[in-house]
Image: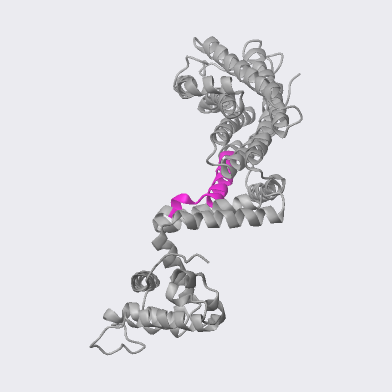
Amino acid sequence: MVIDGLVQGSVLAGGAVLVWALALYVASRSPRRRVSQLSAAAMLCLAAYLMGEALGALAPDLPTWATWLRRTWWAPSLALPIWLVLSLALTVEEGPEPWSVRVRRWFRPVAIALIGLGGLFGIVGVFTSEVQDWANPFTDPVSGARHSPAATLLPAFQVFALVCLVWSSLNLLRLWRASPPGSPLRARFAWLSGSAVLFLLGGGWVVVASGIFRLLGLPGQLLLVIGMLILGWNMARYGALVVGEQVLSDFLAYSATMATIVIVYGGVLLTLAPDYGWIERELPLLLLVMTTHVLVDSRGHLLDRVLYAPVLRSLHGQLRELGNRVIRQPDELTALVEVRESVDQLLRERSQQTDFRVLVEGALRNLNDLPALSVHPLLSWLPELDQAERTPLERAAQLRSTLELAIERLRPTGAARPSPGSSAVGGWLHYLVLREAYVDGRPNKQIMQRYALSEGTFHRARRRAIDAIATDVASRSSSAQPVDQ
């Protein structure tokens, strides 16, 4: 049966968008897990392959069809070994102990060899006609399917593809059988085994039925799409299962955002002339827009490296990751516990001096709030202020006095204090910044305007001044460590 190229191309394009979006979700939600990276890579490769097949099906002539398949030949060549390596990585993480230990020993060299061989097939297929004869495409008169004649290396690639598909299927079936009955992990591996079967059937159809017997490749490609969707969802569930999170609400929010991007972008494209040149530019561009949205929304590490100091970008990334984990917690109390433990861990990772410096800045922010100072953690770091015979407000007043005296020690001697409106603050900079921000309680913007300070100069001066205050207070205290209560 001959299927119209517009229908086939539209179906494959939709599959490419769905698989690409799910791959981005898996990659962005578990960026540091090896199995998540591998599953996302396999899905991205399949999406690229489907995009090439979609644009080929919509192509107005055979040479354009062959050009797009040639451009994206690398994608299936890499997807096959990555899928096999993913099944081996799952074996290392979840397989029975003896089997897991054996696979772990040779996992890295085998993974490099498999992906290297797939990459080699991809390079040869893109830049030569040794796998497919791209220069002589033809249309089958019975099925209406487009084909390129087989070349010297096609049988070797077909064997490689079937080995990858069969081996990965056996790995996942064994993991499913080895999982505890009735466990969530067994359910995940059951679904992944179903994906493996679909990949075996779909890949077999594309490699054998379409590649050898010249049947239409769409049935096999649809099986691959369904298998990849099952894979993506279950890998997201697997990552959440490992850390005790839930993903449904987060996934629905992500899906709504992606659907909005596709709808808005599609609405804009409908205003353009729907010729083939428009289609072959806009489908890859849509995938690029989806990718940039995920990169900017959930990662941003490159911008952090450019814009922020090392400590700040580290904290920014850790807090961003914490926020992503919190929304996947099963209940509100669990989310609160996650926040508390993560923030405590962040503080523990800093040095003792950094802890003290953080407390000093917190006390300065509450310098004119005696009730807040009366229960401030800095009191427990300064034994001379944490005396039981004093009332809480007395201890707060003494803490405020200690900090004010430390600020006064920043005051230069023998020079007149600059008046507001003067830009020549000289050695008064650090004193004025702390005095007016914390003792006088003036807003940062007002201080910058009073002394013609740039935002960068103001924040650098305040940071250095607080560092000096923290060092001064710690050196004058008999101990700069928490007092046991």
Q: Nearer the viewer, residue 127 or 207?
A: 207
Q: Is residue 301 magenta?
A: yes
For the point 51% across and 52% down, the residue is 318
Whole-percent x and y of residue 2?
74, 20
The reply, left or right, for residue 184 in relation to residue 440 is right
Compared to residue 240, the image places residue 8 above or below, namely above
In this view, the residue farthest toward the front is: 389
Q: Residue at x 44, y 50 (%)?
A: 302
Instruction: Report if residue 88 lies within the magenta region.
Output: no
Res. 39 visible in picture: yes
- Residue 480, position as x, y percentages in the image: 40, 67
| 286 vs 149, nearest the viewer | 286
Q: Which residues are magenta?
A: 283-304
Indicate the quadrant containing the N terminus: top left, top right, bottom left or bottom right. Answer: top right
Residue shown at 45% from the left, 85% from the top: 440
Quarter of the figure with residue 8? top right
